[in-house]
Image (cartoon, coloured by chain):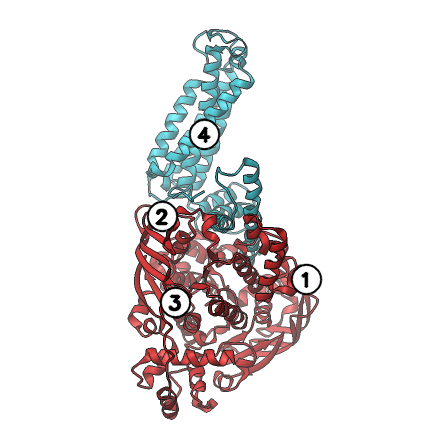
Amino acid sequence: MQIEFSDFSFQYKSLDKPTLKNINLKIQKGEKIVIIGASGSGKSTIGRCLNGLIPHAIKGQCSGQLNIAGKDTSRFEMQHYTELVGTVLQDTDSQFVGLTVGEDIAFALENQCTPTVEMYPVVKSTAQMVELESMLDRSPQELSGGQKQRVSLAGILVDDVDILLFDEPLAALDPKTSKKTIEIIDQLHRDAGKTIIIIEHRLEDVLHRDVDRIILMAEGQIVADMTPDELLASSLLETHGIREPLYLSALKSAGCTLNRNDKPANLRSLSLEQYKGDVLDWFNASHIDALPIEQPALLTLSGLTYSYNGDVNAVDDVSFSVNKGEFVSILGKNGSGKSTLTKLIMGVVEPDLGKIFLNDQDLAELSIFERSQRVGVVMQNPNHMISHHMIVDEVAFGLRNRGVDEKIIDEKVMHVLTLCGLKKYRNWPIDALSYGQKKRVTIASILVLEPELLILDEPTAGQDYRSYTAMLSFIKELNANLGITVVIISHDMHLVLEYTTRSIVLSDSKLIADAPMTDVFSQPDLLAKANLTTTSLYELAVHLGIHDTSAFMQYFIQTEQARNIA
Amino acid sequence: MKAEKISFGISYIDTKSALHQLNGITKFVLFMAWVTVVLTTFDLRLIIALVCLGLLLLKMTKVPVKAYRALLIATASVLSLNALFMFLLAPQQGTEFMGTETVLLPLGFYSITQETLFYLVTITLKYFSMFPIALVFVFTTHPTEFSASLNRLGVPYKIAYAVSLTLRYLPEIKKDYVNIMHAQQARGIELSKKASLFSRLKNLTNILGPLIFTSLDRTEEISNAMTLRGFGRNKSRTWYSLKPLTGKDWVCLLTIIVCVSLAIVKRVIEPQLFWYPFN
């Protein structure tokens, strides 16, 4: 037995309740396991127990037993863990310690006092395993997301450990890179016979390649330990707030019942013939709601160009407009110019060429602060926005700067806190909140200013399905009821599919598409240019021989939304 | 305040020049020796020679002048301002050192004397002469190689590594800073000249707070990542980027030792602290 938890519990020093309760789990050598669960379910804590951060770097109360490779870990030093378990952490950017790829890969060897001459061949052969041998002298920061992931993987593989632990490896990656990462992990599992443990809540992406078992966690306990087919045929995912694969949701919408023998874990293995009738009946009976009448433009960008260094344009001749009351998405891979666009709209950088209009007013006439009253931008990292101790002060800050009367401020702040579901926390210090709650505070602090346009940069980053669904349904409501125009910048395909009606796609600083979302999602070549992939919904439609994939997706979303409202 | 386009940065730039080929230890020793020589001397001839040599070395790094021109100008202006203040505080310092008084422009207490001018020029150039070599060091020494060299010279590796990590994370912190600044500006924090100095300082705390917290979070992540890869398990460690000293390095080191010794000897045997040719 490679790993064995018996009656294992753990409580963080700073918390008053245990995070892991009586865990019993066995993992065999060479198995490939996925641990899923909502935020706070304890899945990351299990990972930390496996790699020794608990109890060596993070303090708390342990009870029960954990054996790794047949040895009791209670007598382990940190280095015993390091020799057995290699960990790839969530945020690759923050774990690069070396200034070149080669140096970063060699880090573990350096710490073991391997002589410098002996390091070079080992580093080189490890780099070859992940196809990085030509980049040893580059800085890890200059690489693309997928290459960074491979560097951190190589940094672990150089040690020749038997167990590889991946802590939310897909969190920061675009869909195409995610797929590639899952393929590399699968290859390591098959070729090198490593035991693989993946902690992730993006289940559909992980299941791109087969896994042996899925462990579902909730509130510190294991609620399911079964094969992917069994789990997906059950209703456990829905009960525990995990996003189920899109094709399954679609099949269920069409009234199909799934059985574990049908192998629902993967669209490729699922025999679709038996459902074809049901799905086609469902789709043929569909009627697509007429699109709402086009409203006048709120935000118009014309010929916008900006370059950071004068050589390469970060935004190159981009023109589009966003109409009043729309819910639009901007898509593109890292470095395609999405964030620069936001900065230009905020006014923190000025365009080299081109103009931005809001309701026919040239934004260049307004200061940053004046713009912010009308265009609210919620940045990706809430820690960059929050500057106060108490939630109330944080939310009231913008209004106070505007010089609004305290009494009115109080009213407005209370109203917006109620809307955002933060009312009961209003007198809490912000440090006590989770990442998702902090994100909500930042949204509240923007909404209180009553902007006409709301821009959300990667709203789902760092949040699980349940909490971001709650947040976005709320924004959707604001969009529908108050007519606030919303733009989201994201590479989360599910999010874009579920909420936005039109997509603007950027690639290499240029606008390459501006079309209804379902049209964009029906063009694999276009998506590939932006490092995106088609969704399984589209693939399902193709497999079933449906030509109008766009209408199919649209009808599915319509039914989902009707179901959510009900 | 609109963010300006910043194209230069003070960091390692690999131009593969002859200076880049030298070992980190050699360059570090050169830098320390340089500082020592500058500190021991008040001889304008030597100082001017050092300034010229420093600028020549800077040119040899093949780093485009564009990358450091702004910095050179800024340093020169700060130093000139410094000279002005020195004059305002002690207008007769030069006369005291040289022991003579040659008034060029009689202004009572603030009379400008030839000695004071000479004194101020010497001091300003003396400070300035350290600047090009510092840039040379930063541009040509890979930060980890520098840490490895420090470790080789006897500094404990955890401290040496902290130095390279700081250099490694400076750009990230800069990025955070810009993001936070943008977020706060959008919320009405005025950082431009429109606001008074006091409120600008107060507003700066709105950026520093989040910056410190973000950096602390990052520190924790990095430290966990390093622990997981075995940092700190042994009393010593080896370095991937440590290069052996070559013949060229030894030649340089030897020259440096000779030069430093000569400078010290010069300081000891010379009776006069300042070199002043007009006596």
Q: Are marks 2 and 3 in contact (CB under 8 Å)?
A: no
The image shows residue B23, relative to residue A225, as above or below, that is above
- The residue beneath circle 4 is B130
Q: Tell me, yes or no, whether dots 1 and 3 are on the same chain.
A: yes
Select label 2 or label 4 by which is in front: 2
Of A447 and B247, the residue lying toward us: A447
Q: Residue at x 44, y 63 (%)?
A: A485
The image shows residue A80, relative to residue A560, as above or below, that is above
Q: Which mark is residue A177?
A: 3
Residue type of the residue flagged with mark 4: Met
Q: Colour of chain A?
A: red
Mark 3–mark 4 distance (CA, rounded to whole Å): 48 Å
Q: Colour of chain B?
A: cyan
- The residue beneath circle 2 is A308
Of B54 and A199, the residue lying toward us: A199
- Mark 2 crowd level (few <14, some 14–19, many ≥20, 10 Å Cα): some
Q: Secondary structure at mark 2?
A: loop
- Mark 4 crowd level (few <14, some 14–19, many ≥20, 10 Å Cα): many
Residue type of the residue flagged with mark 3: Thr
